[in-house]
Image: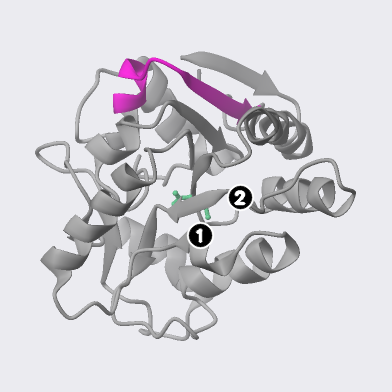
């Protein structure tokens, strides 16, 4: 792991954008794994600005998102489909047919999850996977568990995740389950760009970087990745 502790989330967004920009310049038809949440918004704005100015193009890029809520219409303001389009995809020159998110309304969940992993493989695998972390150490929606997960699967969300994310929903409207890429799929990415900012992530960051590798802290698996760049701001690094 390469750990970069920077002063501000804005600095992180610029450095992380440099990595994505370099990849797409080197390999215009690269495959990116993207993430949702408050953390990556600055990065998406930075990349969209660079696309708008003509510095980079996503016209041949394929994307796979980490996760999506179950039983929430894609048109819902809180679906990750809507989040990604509003915060990023609608602002860049990506082709809609190259954008993939798990379908949280799939009738045959198992078949859909299998097909999602197959689609990633058929696209040539993930060149860069972007990750954030939950306060409970989750990556994607891989919650603390007895074992590390493998491929894309349906997960019951923990109380901690429901508490963190229910701020976006009307009372009791937050879905209780989601589809998420599994740990093996995430770890198969050639490169990982991880971002954590703010004091509320400090404990998860400490456990992830300085604790042992355990499925009870899913992000700790990144200690074993061959090319993971860990961006944390001063606040998230405050317990190291
Ligand atoms: P956040 O979510 O960026 O909204 O803090 C991160 C995560 O839960 O992975």
Please give the count of numbered marks on the rendered protein: 2
Helix, strand or loop at label 2? It is: loop
Q: Residues within 10 Å of mark 1 (few under 14, many from 20)?
A: some
Establish if 163 lies above or below 72.
above
Q: CB of residue at label 1: within 8 Å of ligand 1? A: no
Q: Which of marks 1 and 2 is nearer the N terminus?
A: 2
Q: Is residue 195 shown left or right of residue 71? A: right
Quadrant in the rendering for residue 88? bottom right
Contact check, label 1 and label 2, Cβ < 8 Å: yes
In the depicted view, which residue is nearer to us: 145 or 104?
104
Instruction: Report the coloring of the rendering.
Output: one colour
Establish if 16 lies above or below 3.
below
Image point 69% across, 69% down: which residue?
90
Residue 197 painted magenta? no
Q: CB of residue at label 2: within 8 Å of ligand 1? A: no
* Residue 215 appears in the rendering: yes
Q: Which residue is tagged 1?
A: 98
Q: Is residue 72 shown left or right of residue 1? A: left
Part of the protein shown in magenta = 221-233
In the depicted view, which residue is nearer to us: 152 or 218?
152
Image location of residue 86, percent across then percent down = 66, 71
Q: Is residue 233 shown left or right of residue 11? A: left
Image location of residue 207, percent across then percent down = 36, 26
Alpha carbon of mark 1 to alpha carbon of mark 2: how far? 8 Å
Image point 43% across, 24% down: which residue?
206
Residue 231 painted magenta? yes
Q: Which residue is tagged 2?
A: 60
Q: Residues within 10 Å of mark 2 (few under 14, many from 20)?
A: some
* Residue 239 appears in the rendering: no
Image location of residue 180, percent across then percent down = 29, 55
């Amino acid at each position: 792991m390469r750990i970069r502790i920077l002063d501000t989330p804005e600095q992180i967004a610029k450095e992380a954008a440099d990595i994505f920009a370099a990849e797409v310049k080197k390999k215009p038809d690269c495959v990116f794994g993207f993430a949702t949440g408050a953390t990556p918004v600055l990065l998406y704005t930075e990349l969209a600005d660079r696309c708008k100015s003509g510095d980079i193009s996503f016209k041949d890029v394929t994307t796979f998102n980490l996760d999506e809520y179950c039983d929430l219409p894609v048109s819902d303001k809180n679906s990750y489909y809507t989040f990604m389009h509003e915060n990023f995809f609608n602002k860049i020159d990506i082709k809609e047919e190259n954008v993939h998110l798990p379908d949280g309304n799939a009738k045959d969940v198992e078949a859909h999850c299998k097909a999602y992993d197959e689609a990633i493989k058929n696209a040539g695998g993930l060149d860069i996977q972007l990750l954030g972390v939950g306060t409970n150490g989750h990556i994607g929606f891989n919650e603390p568990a007895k074992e590390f997960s493998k491929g894309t699967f349906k997960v019951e969300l923990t109380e901690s995740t429901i508490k963190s994310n229910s701020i976006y929903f009307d009372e009791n409207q937050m879905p209780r389950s989601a589809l998420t890429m599994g740990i093996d799929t995430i770890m198969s990415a050639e490169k990982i760009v991880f971002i954590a900012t703010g004091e509320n992530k400090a404990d998860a960051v400490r456990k992830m970087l300085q604790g042992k590798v355990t499925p009870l802290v899913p992000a700790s698996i990144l200690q074993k990745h061959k090319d993971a760049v860990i961006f944390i701001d001063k606040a998230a690094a405050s317990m190291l």
